[in-house]
Image (cartoon, helix red, strand yellow):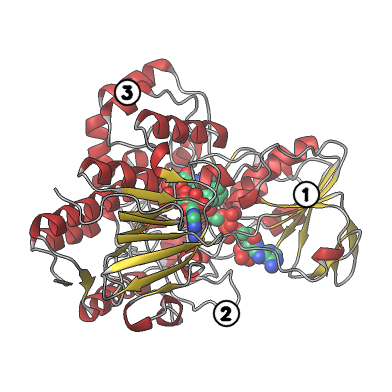
């Protein structure tokens, strides 16, 4: 394999030339770098952070951990790696996952090809040269014949825009940008805004340390006990012995998780007792596989209601104060918003030092010097935490001012929602790829399974381009339109539009309401991607 421009350019002019520029050094960017080096391309990764790990570098809030089992939420591409690495828990903590990311970076000699503390804020296609020009916030320029966006789907934090934040005299933190040296909550009055997955993990841990914790809830979320525990050496050995088979099962599962075990029956085809026993069995087992109990929980209102009602009953059994229990009981369909997995979330509301407030009854007006001001009260806090999520799927991409052919701005093209062929590539933006982009299973799956599939597809595509001496690949607008209609059709046949989730952009004011990931599951999606590649990239123009 030969590369057209494989040597670095003049560092004096701060201009760098590569075959491929990858943006982001999370799990996606690291694996992309590894695979592209393997096929002989000269690659540079640009990363805003000071280290690798992406999500696990930034989200250091108390209680942060994965909710896909660690033995599966890990790379499968190297058997040596998966055999030598030992996870301590069923769901490991953020520090352990970050340690794993660092181990991978060292083991595969990746660090020397990553430029840290480099935020990309402009990305422009030079059609004449058929190359991408990326500019960093400090003015450096990087050229690549190809550009791969490994910028993450949950990496652009929803920054708090509450009025008066600048007047607040206490400390405030955002879960997705947590300080590296931790936060001491002891003896402090703490307020937390948000009750999504991040808050559900953080609340029980902070409540144990703080003097008092006040939770501001806008929408109650369903949470299933994670039943986290240390892994036994015999179960680890068993999984390691069967890893090849388990990883294959993961690739064949709609969510990319071998241990998910989807129920094949519909909920109403079994008796009420059988259904209750199955929900109880999954509740005891713990984790987000709960909603996979029946095949129609995600598509049928009646089926969904049975699962939702089971969880609401559990909340009422667990939480002593009936008013608090009612407030914690979600009213939307289960699984419409991302299901949470917790350790003692509902139990935490039985503590005397925890208060739950409903911002729908008493809306937040903003912050004042003492703390949070609502319509009816001022709540004084030493610390306020914003656990208000992300501008998911599109935020990181749109923040880079990506400009394609003929000055096309991605921001304009996506003003009515993201458009992409297979979540991998966009018409008008040649030689640019997105890992786990909108229109792919992405956030509806074990992201490791999806990341590996996308990276391998992009690697093979670039091998094909190089071997054929091609210079440009770009999806046909017609193929992109057909794919996005299919993505929409699949989502419309589910209960996915029945709530205000970040999947539809509802958490970001003004964002177009459109279901962004592909809800058809990994197997048909992978089949489609494989068919496209096998047919010589059907749906793409290659020149
Ligand atoms: P990220 O890890 O988000 O990495 C993207 C990187 O790109 C970041 O380092 C960022 O700094 C960098 N970047 C972005 N824009 C720029 C720019 N303009 N210039 C330079 N650098 C840039 N998924 C699961 O499957 N299971 C889980 O249990 C799970 N738990 C999660 C827990 C939390 C708290 C969060 C927030 C997400 C979780 N996810 C989980 C989703 C998670 O994001 C993915 O699993 C995975 O880590 C994504 O990897 P990535 O490399 O694609 O993106
Ligand atoms: P999130 O799910 O979007 O939750 C944000 C919370 O903040 C919601 O409760 C939201 O309420 C609330 N909120 C937002 N703006 C608000 C406002 N102006 N006023 C009051 N409340 C406001 O974000 P997240 O908890 O960070 O999780 C995002 C995703 O990251 C998850 O869904 C998951 O995919 C991933 N994640 C996974 C784990 C894990 O367990 N492994 C942990 C953390 C995150 P509304 O619901 O009303 O919008």
Q: Is residue 367 visible?
A: yes
- Residue 80 occupies quadrant: top left
Screen quadrant of the C terminus: bottom left
Residue at the spot x=90%, y=66% of the render? 377
Instruction: Answer with the quadrant where ligand 2 appears in the image.
Output: bottom right
- Residue 507 occupies quadrant: bottom right
Q: Is residue 362 visible?
A: no
Q: CA distance from mark 2 to mark 1?
A: 37 Å
Secondary structure found at label 1: loop
Numbered circles on residues, count: 3
Q: What label sits on residue 510 in the rendered view?
A: 2
**Cβ atoms under marks 2 and 1 closer than 8 Å:** no
Vertical side of 456 occupied by 304: above or below: below
Queried on whether the Cβ of the residue with tag 1 lies below 8 angstroms from ligand 2, the answer reads no
Spot occupied by residue 331 in the image (x, y as percentages of width and height) = 59, 64
How packed mark 1 is, by other alpha carbons closer than 10 Å (few <14, some 14-19, many 20 or more), is few
Q: In front here: 370 or 504?
A: 370
Secondary structure found at label 2: loop
Pointer 3: what residue? 83
How packed mark 3 is, by other alpha carbons closer than 10 Å (few <14, some 14-19, many 20 or more), is some
The disc, 3 or 2, on the residue closer to the chain's N-terminal end is 3
Pointer 1: what residue? 321
Q: Nearer the viewer, mark 3 or mark 1?
A: 3
Direction from residue 462 to residue 321 in the image, left or right: right
Q: CA distance from mark 3 to mark 1?
A: 47 Å
Spot occupied by residue 505 in the image (x, y as percentages of width and height) = 51, 70
């Amino acid at each position: 394999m030969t590369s057209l421009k494989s040597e670095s350019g003049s560092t004096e002019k701060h201009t760098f030339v590569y075959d491929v520029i990858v943006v982001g050094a999370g799990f996606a960017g690291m694996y992309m770098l590894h695979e592209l080096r393997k096929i002989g391309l000269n690659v540079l990764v640009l990363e805003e952070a000071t280290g690798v790990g992406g999500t696990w570098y930034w989200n250091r809030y108390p209680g942060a951990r994965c909710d896909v089992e660690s033995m599966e939420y890990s790379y499968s591409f190297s058997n040596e790696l998966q055999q030598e690495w030992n996870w301590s828990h069923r769901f490991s903590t953020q520090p352990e996952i970050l340690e794993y990311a660092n181990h991978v970076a060292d083991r595969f000699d990746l660090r020397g090809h990553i430029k840290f503390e480099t935020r990309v804020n402009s990305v422009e296609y030079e059609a004449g040269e058929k190359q991408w020009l990326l500019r960093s916030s400090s003015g450096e320029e990087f050229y690549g014949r190809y550009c791969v966006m490994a910028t993450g789907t949950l990496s652009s934090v929803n920054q708090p825009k509450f009025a008066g934040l600048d007047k607040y005299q206490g400390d405030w933190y955002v879960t997705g940008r947590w300080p590296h040296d931790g936060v001491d909550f002891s003896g402090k009055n703490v307020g937390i805004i948000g009750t999504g997955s991040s808050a559900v993990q953080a609340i029980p841990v902070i409540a144990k340390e703080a003097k008092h914790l006040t939770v501001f809830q806008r929408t109650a979320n369903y949470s299933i006990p994670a039943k986290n525990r240390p892994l036994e050496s015999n179960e680890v050995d068993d999984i390691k012995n069967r890893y090849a088979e388990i990883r294959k099962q993961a690739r064949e599962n709609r969510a990319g998780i071998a241990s998910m075990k989807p129920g094949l029956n519909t909920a109403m085809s079994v008796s009420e007792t059988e259904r209750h026993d199955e929900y109880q069995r999954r509740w005891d087992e713990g984790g987000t596989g709960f909603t996979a109990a029946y095949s129609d929980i995600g598509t049928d209102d009646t089926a969904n209601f049975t699962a939702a009602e089971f969880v609401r009953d559990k909340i009422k059994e667990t939480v002593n104060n009936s008013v608090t229990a009612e407030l914690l009981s979600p009213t939307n369909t289960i699984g419409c918003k991302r299901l949470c997995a917790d350790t003692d979330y509902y139990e935490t509301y039985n503590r005397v030092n925890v208060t739950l407030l409903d911002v729908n009854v008493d809306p937040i007006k903003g912050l004042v010097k003492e703390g949070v001001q609502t319509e009816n009260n001022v709540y004084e806090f030493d610390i306020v935490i914003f656990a208000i999520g992300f501008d998911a799927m599109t935020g990181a991409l749109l923040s880079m001012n990506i400009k394609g052919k003929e000055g096309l701005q991605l921001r304009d093209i996506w003003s009515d929602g993201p458009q992409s062929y297979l979540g991998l590539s966009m018409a008008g933006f040649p030689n640019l790829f997105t890992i786990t982009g909108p229109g792919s299973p992405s956030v509806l799956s074990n992201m490791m399974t999806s990341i590996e599939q996308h990276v391998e597809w992009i690697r093979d595509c670039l091998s094909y381009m190089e071997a054929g001496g091609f210079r440009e690949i770009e999806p046909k607008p017609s193929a992109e339109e057909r794919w996005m209609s299919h993505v929409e059709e699949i989502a419309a046949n589910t209960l996915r539009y029945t709530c205000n989730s970040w999947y539809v952009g509802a958490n970001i004011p003004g964002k177009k309401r459109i279901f962004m990931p592909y809800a058809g599951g990994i197997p048909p999606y992978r089949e489609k991607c494989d068919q496209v590649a096998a047919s010589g990239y059907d749906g793409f123009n290659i020149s």
